[in-house]
Image (cartoon, rainbow, N blue to C red):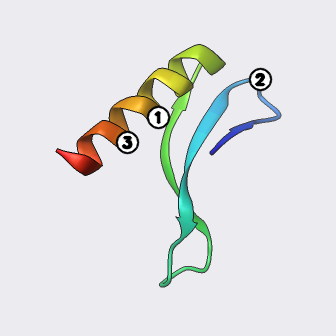
Amino acid sequence: MIRKLSSGEYRLYSRKVDSRTGKRRNLGTFKSRAAAEKHERAVQYFKRH
């Protein structure tokens, strides 16, 4: 899940809510949406291999 920040950067959040904090986990902040989407695919691949 990618959200745009007020600073103009994009942040990748986990899809599920963290049970300890009740919020989504920050999985990295990126300058461009394309970079965030690329990392999101890498995370999904890593989860399954």
Furthest-front residue in view? 48
Q: Residue at x 25, y 42 (%)?
A: 46
| Distance CA(mark 3)–CA(mark 1) | 6 Å
Furthest-left residue in view? 49
Q: What element carries label 1?
A: helix
Crowding around mark 2 (Cα neighbors within 10 Å: few <14, some 14 to 19, many 20+) is few
Q: What element carries label 2?
A: loop
Q: Are marks 3 and 1 in contact (CB under 8 Å)?
A: yes
Residue 3: give x, y in percent of width and height: 72, 40
Q: Are marks 1 and 2 in contact (CB under 8 Å)?
A: no
The residue to which callout 2 is attached is: 8
Of tags 1 and 2, which is closer to the observer?
Answer: 1
Of tags 2 and 3, which is closer to the observer?
Answer: 3
The mark nearer the N terminus, 1 or 2, is 2
Q: Which amino acid does label 2 sit on?
A: Gly
Q: In this view, does 5 lie above or below 20?
A: above
User: Split into 4 quadrants, where in the image is the C terminus?
Assistant: top left
Q: What residue type is labelled 1?
A: Glu
Q: How many labels does the image show?
A: 3
The mark nearer the N terminus, 2 or 3, is 2
Crowding around mark 3 (Cα neighbors within 10 Å: few <14, some 14 to 19, many 20+) is few
Q: What element carries label 3?
A: helix
Q: What residue type is labelled 3?
A: Gln
Give the left or right position of residue 48, taking residue 7 as reference: left
The residue to which callout 3 is attached is: 44
Give the left or right position of residue 13, taking residue 20 as reference: right
Specify the quadrant of the image occupied by residue 39: top left
Q: Residue at x 62, y 71 (%)?
A: 23
The residue to which callout 1 is attached is: 40
